[in-house]
Image (cartoon, rainbow, N blue to C red):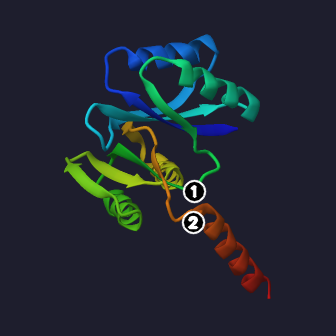
Amino acid sequence: MKHTLSILVEDESGVLSRISCLFARRGFNIDSLAVGPAEIDGISRMTISVRGNNRIIEQLVKQLNKLINILHVQNVTNIPCVERELILIKVNATQEDRSSILEIANIFRAKVVDLSINSLILEISGDPGKIFTIQQLLNQYKIIQIARTGKIILVRDSKVNTEFLKMADYKKESIYIAR
C-alpha cells in the first residue's frame, strides 16, 4: 500500500540526507519527495510517498521521530487532505495533432507554456489522478520529456474526504444509469 508522510524539519543541512539514508537502510524506495519552506521561518515541510504495510510504516515513523532536526512526522494516508502535483509535459505536436492535444489540454485546464513547430509544453497541476490521466491520454502523441514534482499535501481542517464524496457521486450515478 502507498503511504504519504508529512514531516516538519528544521531547515538545516544534512536533514534530507539523514532521512533518505534511513529509508535506504530499511530497504524503502521513495516514490515521491517534495520539500519546501513551511509557514515558520527556518522550518521546512517534506511530503514523502512510500510503499509498505501499516506495521512497517509505523516503525518507519517512529525511527524518523528519533532523528535530529525532525520536529513532527505524520502519516496522512487515511486523513482527508488536499493533495497536488505539478507536471510539465513536452509533447510531439504535428500540425495534424495540435488541435487534438490542445483540446485535451483545455479539458484538463492545462497551460501551454511553450510552443514550437514540432512540439509544445503543457503545465498541469492537480491531484495525482488528474496528472496520471492526462499523461495517459498524451502518450498517443509521443511524449518527448516529462518533469514532475512530488506530491504536496495539507490536511483538511474541514475533515471532508473528497475521495469519499467522489465515490458517493459515482455510486449515485451508477444507480441512476441502472434504472
- Please state, as top left, top right, bottom left or bottom right, where the N terminus lies in the image: top right
Residue furthest to the bottom = 179
Amino acid type at image mark 1: Pro
- Say if 97 sits above or below 59 in the image: below
Tell me which residue sits at (62%, 38%) in the image: 3
Q: Is residue 100 visible?
A: yes
Q: Give coordinates of residue 16: x percent, y percent.
A: 41, 20
User: Image quarter for residue 39?
Assistant: top left
Q: Which mark, by number, is residue 61? A: none
Q: Is residue 93 visible?
A: no
User: Mark 2 or 1 closer to N-term?
Assistant: 1
Q: SS for tag 2?
A: loop
Relative side of 32 to 164, left or right: left
- Please state, as top left, top right, bottom left or bottom right, where the C terminus lies in the image: bottom right
Tell me which residue sits at (36%, 53%) in the image: 124
In this view, the residue in front, 55 or 85, is 55
Tell me which residue sits at (21%, 50%) in the image: 115
In this view, the residue in front, 136 or 64, is 64
- Circle 1 is placed at which residue position? 80
The alpha-carbon separation of the residues under discs 2 and 1 comes to 6 Å
Badge 2, how many Cα within 10 Å: few under 14, some, many 20+? some
Q: SS for tag 1?
A: loop
In this view, the residue in front, 80 or 129, is 80
In this view, the residue in front, 126 or 102, is 126
- Circle 2 is placed at which residue position? 160
